[in-house]
Image (cartoon, rainbow, N blue to C red):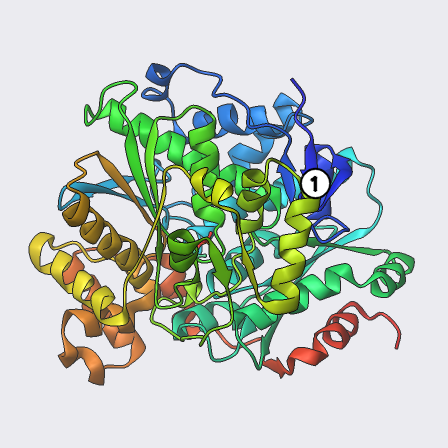
């Protein structure tokens, strides 16, 4: 059965999977969504015996129906290889009665690697299939982790260039160092004087700029996106939820068909949406618990049905979740509105005009198994210390937000369902915040001394991604105003004026 992809803002805009990946964002500003969610093609019992790569093939084949088997196998085998430091690719770690799904064993030690190690292969394959003769320019806004993972994936990939915008004062020191030391002639990294939402809105504007599109077209370029607005990011993220279920079955932690709750530390709503898609494929997922930090716009939305971005923006120790406009929520809103592009477009127009919209009671009722929760900065730090002291397990700040939200949820509801917590980053990436949470005495150490201490107390090996940046030279030092993004892109591409 072929699955086509429709824009959330225009019912007539309908394309193949490969075209949706190439385009990134729909021209009307909407996001591509699959016309229907395919059912899992294998019985649950089979999942227990499948490798990560086999699971990826099963899931992705049913979403990306215009890719051939050979094309998909090629993409999967090149993406999920020794770049990951474990053959399991995404291992489960049991601690304090739940399962931490470690999604940070890839090249840049955050969960973005799960999708961004395969996106360049999907993108270049899609380009070939569609006889694309333009060079693809990946435009990316990052809250810290997407940028590096996308750079690592696209660096020196023929036929592509990549531009990354990050909030100059809104990422961790390790995140910034990872990006500004990026090699590759086709890469460009720029700090902006603003926050992530400014960067993301700026990038969306560039996508929608018809004049710029025409100008680039003439010079042989076309834009695409590596953000989770690209369906080529979302589909690979469905895989690890299916895989986790298989691992739990294999280890005898659950029996076939038994539901599993999923807790996801959320920013742009991509990761948790992938879990929702997995549930819609027929994976026995119970509650989908959406965890926010102090930027709790999503928590408030789940409580009230009102999405309101008009509020103070907080810089937190979980910077990849410092987001007030969660782009992928649009895909859920579209769904709740009965796949009605016009209704969805009206909500999105409200959001862009007034920064707020309110869904109907009927739509709220169909939110079903979604739950919202949030953790303050203090609660997040407490959770890191608590888990370390109780279990000797060190988690990063983002995972800690989810872990704390889950502890609160379990206490409040008494829900004893087996639970998977998405562990989205290595603690090494946020070593300062993590070590200070464990003991304030670490405050006086420099970043790399902290990393050595972290290795000591957690009995884990320092990841290669960290060793690499110890001595790497800074290759990108541009910092610009938000209003200068267009000119910066044109300069990098050598497009006139
Ligand atoms: C990107 C990111 C998140 C948020 O994921 P979304 O898909 O944007 O909701 C959470 N934690 C880490 C470490 C991230 O890099």
Q: Looking at the image, which is closer to me, 281 or 478?
A: 281
Horizontal side of 399 relative to 16 (left or right) equals: left
Element under label 1?
A: helix
Q: Looking at the image, which is closer to me, 319 or 340?
A: 340
Residue shown at 10% from the left, 52% from the top: 391
Work out which quarter of the rendered image holds the C terminus and state it.
bottom right
Q: Position of residue 404 (x, y in %)?
A: 22, 56
Q: Looking at the image, which is closer to me, 471 or 189?
A: 189
Horizontal side of 108 relative to 398 (left or right) equals: right
Residue 181 visible in the picture: no
Ligand 1 shows up in which quadrant of the image? Answer: bottom left
Residue shown at 50% from the left, 76% from the top: 473
Please rate how many residues cluster around mark 1, counting C-alpha atoms within 10 Å: few if below 14, some from 14 to 19, many from 20: many
Residue shown at 65% from the left, 78% from the top: 482
Q: Which residue was labeled with disc 1?
A: 20
Taking the view exactly as shown, the residue that stands out farthest to the right is 218
Residue shown at 63% from the left, 36% from the top: 339
Work out which quarter of the rendered image holds the N terminus and state it.
top right
């Amino acid at each position: 059965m072929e699955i086509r992809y429709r824009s959330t803002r225009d019912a007539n805009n309908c394309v193949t999977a490969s075209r949706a990946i190439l385009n990134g964002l729909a021209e009307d500003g909407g996001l591509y969504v699959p016309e229907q969610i395919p059912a899992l093609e294998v019985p649950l019992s089979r999942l227990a015996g499948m490798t990560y790569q086999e699971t990826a093939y099963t899931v992705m084949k049913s979403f990306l129906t215009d890719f051939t088997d050979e094309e998909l196998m090629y993409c999967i085998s090149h993406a999920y290889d020794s770049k990951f430091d474990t053959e399991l690719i995404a291992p489960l770690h049991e601690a304090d009665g739940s399962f931490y799904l470690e999604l940070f064993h890839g090249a840049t030690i955050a969960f973005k690697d799960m999708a961004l190690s395969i996106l360049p292969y999907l993108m270049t394959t899609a380009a070939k299939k569609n006889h694309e003769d333009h060079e693809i320019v990946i435009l990316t806004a990052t809250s810290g982790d997407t940028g590096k993972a996308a750079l690592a994936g696209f660096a020196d990939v023929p036929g592509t260039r990549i531009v990354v915008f990050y909030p100059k004062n809104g990422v961790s020191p390790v995140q910034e160092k990872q990006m500004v030391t990026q090699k590759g002639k086709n890469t460009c990294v720029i700090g902006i004087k603003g926050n992530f939402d400014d960067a993301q809105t700026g990038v969306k504007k560039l996508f929608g700029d018809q004049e710029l599109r025409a100008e680039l077209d003439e010079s042989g370029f076309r834009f695409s996106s590596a953000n989770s607005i690209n369906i080529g990011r979302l589909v690979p993220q469905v895989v690890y939820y299916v895989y986790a279920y298989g691992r739990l079955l294999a280890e005898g932690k659950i029996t076939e068909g038994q539901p599993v709750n999923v807790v996801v530390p959320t920013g742009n709503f991509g990761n948790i949406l992938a879990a929702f898609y997995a549930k819609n494929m027929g994976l026995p997922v119970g509650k989908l618990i959406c965890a926010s930090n102090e930027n709790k716009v999503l928590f408030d939305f789940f409580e009230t049905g009102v999405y309101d971005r008009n509020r103070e923006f907080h810089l937190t120790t979980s910077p990849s979740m410092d987001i007030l406009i969660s782009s992928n929520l649009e895909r859920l809103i579209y769904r709740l509105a009965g796949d009605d592009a016009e209704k969805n477009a009206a909500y999105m127009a409200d959001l862009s005009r007034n920064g707020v919209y309110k869904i109907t009671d009927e739509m709220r009722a169909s939110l079903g198994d979604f739950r919202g929760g949030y953790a303050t900065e203090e609660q997040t730090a407490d959770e890191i210390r608590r888990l370390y002291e109780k279990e000797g397990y060190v988690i990063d700040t983002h995972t800690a937000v989810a872990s704390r939200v889950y502890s609160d949820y379990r206490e409040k509801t008494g829900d004893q369902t087996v639970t998977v917590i998405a562990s989205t980053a290595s603690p090494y990436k946020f070593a300062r915040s993590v070590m200070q949470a464990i003991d304030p005495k670490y405050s006086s150490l420099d970043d790399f001394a902290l990393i050595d201490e972290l290795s000591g107390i957690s009995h884990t090996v320092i990841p290669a991604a960290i060793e690499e940046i110890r001595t790497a030279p800074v290759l990108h030092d541009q910092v610009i105003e938000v209003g200068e993004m267009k000119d910066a892109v044109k300069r990098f591409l050598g497009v006139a004026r």
